[in-house]
Image: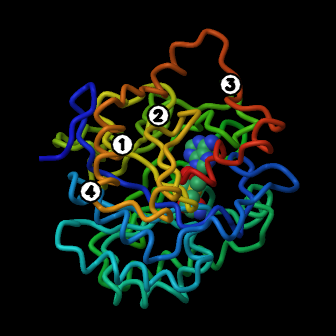
Amino acid sequence: MPVPDTWGRPLRNLRLSVTDRCNLRCQYCMPERDYVWLPRSDILDFEEISSLVDVFADLGVDRVRLTGGEPLVRRDLPELVRLLAQKPLLKDIALTTNGVLLAERAAALERAGLKRVTVSLDTMRPDRFQALTRFDDHARVLAGIEEATRLGFTAVKIDAVIIRGVNDDELVPLLEYGRRVGAEVRFIEYMDVGGATRWSRDKVVSRAEMLGALARRYGPIHPVVEESSAPAERFRLADGTTFGIIASTTAPFCRSCDRSRLTADGLWYLCLYAARGTDLRGPLRAGASRQELRELIEGTWSRRADRGAEERLALRDRSALVPVTTLRRDPHLEMHTRGG
Ligand code: SAM
């Protein structure tokens, strides 16, 4: 049985950020000119990550998602996937990537045992992609998605953050593209996480607005009824096409959140909005036994009461979560460090 927290939420989903580096500069995540990076000597090697995952798996974690930063900038990532794929307690190993390096890496990842891939893609327009990410890599991302859909992954998904005045006119083109290549699209509300220093409430396109826009184009939309702790609510168009909406900003799902995050330097965060994490690298490198690590993780999770997104929703005056000066002092507050 997975360990429950104070609300009975199980310790089940672990997001592993394998690097804080990224090869894009999306304006909703990394809009600044320069960043303070984690010291290289602090970054966990794959053996260390694997040892920590063993302890998490003993406590109920059966789903792992590799993220970052951009996980594919760690060249030997298939090696980590191979280590994880050998663990019988893990049912699912997934990857979230911006797709830039995916076309060249997907086959090796699939051979290593990766099951599912989610690619972030916010626009079908190359000029807009360049404005949004500061890199001219749109064609490479599309090639990555298309290569992934040709391989044997159980699922390929596309995640699109929708921002008013930026790409809110692209719900239909993104959905059509996903349908064409066989990748389910999930629309994400713009979140006021650390790093989103340009966030403001008026730029958030709510789930209700997105459904309204899609219904105007496609007619009635029906919810897909399913039992799941996944963040996306799924919907079906009349022709059977399904898509998801992740309404973390206007309709948070803290009550069913079984996710936690391990940064590339071994800090463990129980909520995307949490100010502090638990240092696992220190004890691991100091030689803590599997039992000692287990007690630390179990004790920390059993005291978990976080419901960051709901607390943000309750704020009357809501603006960017963390000022740039604070982010520079503690890069662990950044979404790209914590792992989205
Ligand atoms: N580099 C990888 C990628 O692009 O998918 C993995 C890391 S990225 C931080 C993970 C996800 O977080 C991406 O889908 C990204 O769009 C999303 N994200 C980043 N900042 C966000 C924000 N302010 N609101 C909503 N989603 C955000």
Tell me the CA gap for discs 4 and 2. Answer: 35 Å
Q: Are marks 4 and 3 in contact (CB under 8 Å)?
A: no
Q: For residue 202, which numbered disc appears in the image?
A: 3
Residue 212: x and y in percent read 45, 31
Q: Secondary structure at mark 1?
A: loop
Q: Nearer the viewer, mark 4 or mark 2?
A: 4
Residue found 64% across the figure and 40% down from its top: 163
Tell me the CA gap for discs 4 and 3. Answer: 48 Å
Tell me the CA gap for discs 1 and 3. Answer: 22 Å
| Position of residue 12 in the picture relative to residue 143 (left or right) | left
Q: Earlier in the sequence, mark 4 or mark 2?
A: 2
Q: Is residue 181 above or below residue 316?
A: below
Q: Nearer the viewer, mark 2 or mark 3?
A: 2
- Residue lying furthest left: 1
Residue found 70% across the figure and 23% down from its top: 319
Which residue, given by chain and number where applicable, does mark 2 sit on?
Answer: 248
Which residue, given by chain and number where applicable, does mark 4 sit on?
Answer: 291
Residue 245 appears in the picture as rendered: yes
Q: Is residue 76 above or below residue 281?
A: below
Q: Secondary structure at mark 2?
A: loop
Residue found 41% across the figure and 84% down from its top: 109
- Res. 36 image quadrant: bottom right
Q: Nearer the viewer, mark 4 or mark 1?
A: 4
Residue 120 appears in the picture as rendered: no
Along the line of sight, the residue nearer the viewer: 119 or 340: 340
Along the line of sight, the residue nearer the viewer: 234 or 111: 111
Q: Earlier in the sequence, mark 4 or mark 1?
A: 1
Q: For residue 231, which numbered disc appears in the image?
A: 1
The residue at label 2 has a CB less than 8 Å from ligand 1 = yes
Tell me the CA gap for discs 2 and 3. Answer: 15 Å
